[in-house]
Amino acid sequence: MNKPNTQTQVLVIGGGPAGSTAATLLARNGIQVTLIEREVFPRYHIGESLLPSCLEIVELLGARELLERQGFQRKPGAFLEWKGEQWSLDFGELRGNYQHSYQVPRAEFDEMLLRHAAAQGVTVCEGTSVREIVYDGERPVAALWEQAASSQLGEIRFDWVIDASGRNGIIANRYLNNRRFHEMFKNVAIWGYWDDVQRLPDGREGAIAVGSIDAGWIWAIPFSDGRMSVGVVLHKDAFQAARRAGSLERVYRNAIASSPLMTRMTAPGRLNSALRVEQDYSYVADRFCGPGFMLAGDAACFLDPLLSTGVHLAMLSGLLAAAGIGSVLRHEVTEAEALAHFDGSYRESYLRLLVFVAAFYETRGKEGYFAKAETLSHFDADPANLRRAFLNLVSGLEDLADAEQTSAHLMGEMQRRIRENLELRRDKTALRSGATADAAQDNARFFDGVEGFTAMSPEHAQAGLYVANVPHLHLARVGPARAGGAGRAGAAVAAVADRETAGRETAHRPVAEAV
């Protein structure tokens, strides 16, 4: 087991997808990185259905061939039985460079990424916990660590720290105290693993299945070893009412029995694991970064498991952190500029998906669980410029309440596009013939701006910067006309970064490819 050195350029706390992505990209660009992970991998984690967008970053990591050799279940898309309707969603039907993704046991996927990070030059220290972070004013400068197995203690000093500690959120929870939970997504997830279940027919055995029920929804994720992850998501109120009437397993099995799709799939199978539970997992930190630190992955925010966005946001934030910190250390941009870019890009991506999830729930039904998303329907923005509306959310966000009062257009436009997307996909004959090509391309372009790596496009620059990968991963500048994407948003985010640096505290893919 490695012991941390006394000094490193960048300390990464946490070895999940966010931490491993950031550490690998930094190391591949010649930066000294130490990664501290509390557990010894492999370790269990939920969040097993990947989006095709994750493959793009896996390629940047130099790990695409490694991923392909793992034998993970190939994921062609999704099948939904939602509010009495059924439809199949196939990756690449409307467009897309990636026609598939994977269903991955996270213990195996995360260990693959962590071992790859070590192979790229990252000093990986497993079984090592951060006991305390030492600050110089508002800037973290060192971490006190402990290795429980050997009772060793030590201190490591750094120039930058990336907190990728997941739900633990060391910086957000212990030092900033700035994590807020979403009222509209106060949910409880219950899940377990099944053997001998029925898979989807017609060559879609690797697709994720999603079925709605009155009080929530259910997922079924197949793995290559024959097992299937089956999870129930209920609003907290519904869960508590059901729990008063019976055991946890009864709540779980009753929910499955209320879904015709899940009843059919699980009928021949058997639950072959203990049930696991998580609740109140939807949250956001008020600040994603500050002097000398960035929050990545679940340490910064988490939405809702419906659209499988967890690993997507984790790897995206790792990419953004690595590009920004690397550019600062090479004196290509100022720290204030890198912080402005990271906060603006990451928060904008998160907010787009926040509205997407809420709109999907509301579009497909307003009863019970789905009514909880309606609190996001009070938006007001210029309908001619959806991107500007999203950027206005970024620049105006002090807390979630501010976001909830910013744009009715966003919710309405998102709902219209979701309905259009589903109708386009439902008519498979028209899709194959190309009769709907123009509408499909327009719809796809819209969702490119919702769930995609827009940070790598100069047209979507934040604070005048975007991520480029040639000749190395860095933040590239755009001309004055594009800087900041939208003047008010770019200026506001830059102002936040300037205040933080000065030491003053401040309070692509279409619907099918997001499941």
Image (tube, rainbow, N blue to C red):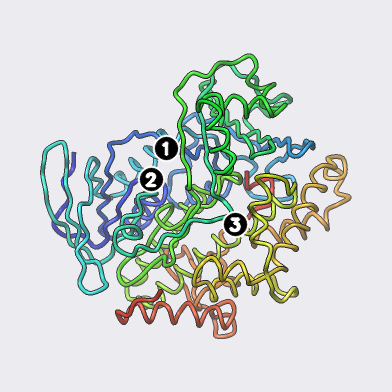
Q: Which residue is mark 1?
A: 45
Q: Mark 3 near mark 1, Cβ–Cβ under 8 Å? A: no
Look at the picture and state if 234 lies above or below 479. above
Q: Residues within 10 Å of mark 2 (few under 14, many from 20)?
A: many
Report the front residue among 198 and 373: 373
Question: Which residue carries the number 3 mark?
Answer: 353
**As shown in the figure, which amino acid type bears the numbered disc 2?**
Gly
From the viewer's perspective, tell me whether residue 492 is left or right of residue 390: left
Q: CA distance from mark 2 to mark 1?
A: 9 Å
| Image quadrant where one finds the N terminus | top left
Q: Earlier in the sequence, mark 2 or mark 1?
A: 2
Q: Which class describes the residues within 10 Å of circle 3: few (<14), some (14-19), or many (20+)?
A: many
The amino acid type found where label 1 is placed reads His
Left or right placement of residue 428 versus residue 196 in this view:
right
Q: Secondary structure at mark 3?
A: helix
SS class, disc 2: loop
x and y, in percent, of residue 229 in the image: 54, 29
> Quick one: which residue is furthest to the bottom in this view?
480
Q: Residue 164 versus residue 59: which sits nearer the camera?
A: 164
Q: CA distance from mark 3 to mark 2?
A: 21 Å
Residue in view at x 63 percent, y 14 percent: 268
Residue of label 2: 16
Q: Nearer the viewer, residue 361 or 456?
A: 361
Circles 3 and 2: CB distance less than 8 Å? no
Q: Secondary structure at mark 1?
A: loop
- Mark 3 / mark 2, whichever is N-terminal: 2
Quarter of the image with the C terminus is top right
Residue 475 at x, y = what percent?
44, 70
Q: Is residue 385 left or right of residue 193?
A: right
Q: Residue furthest top?
A: 268
Q: Mark 2–mark 1 contact, CB under 8 Å?
A: yes
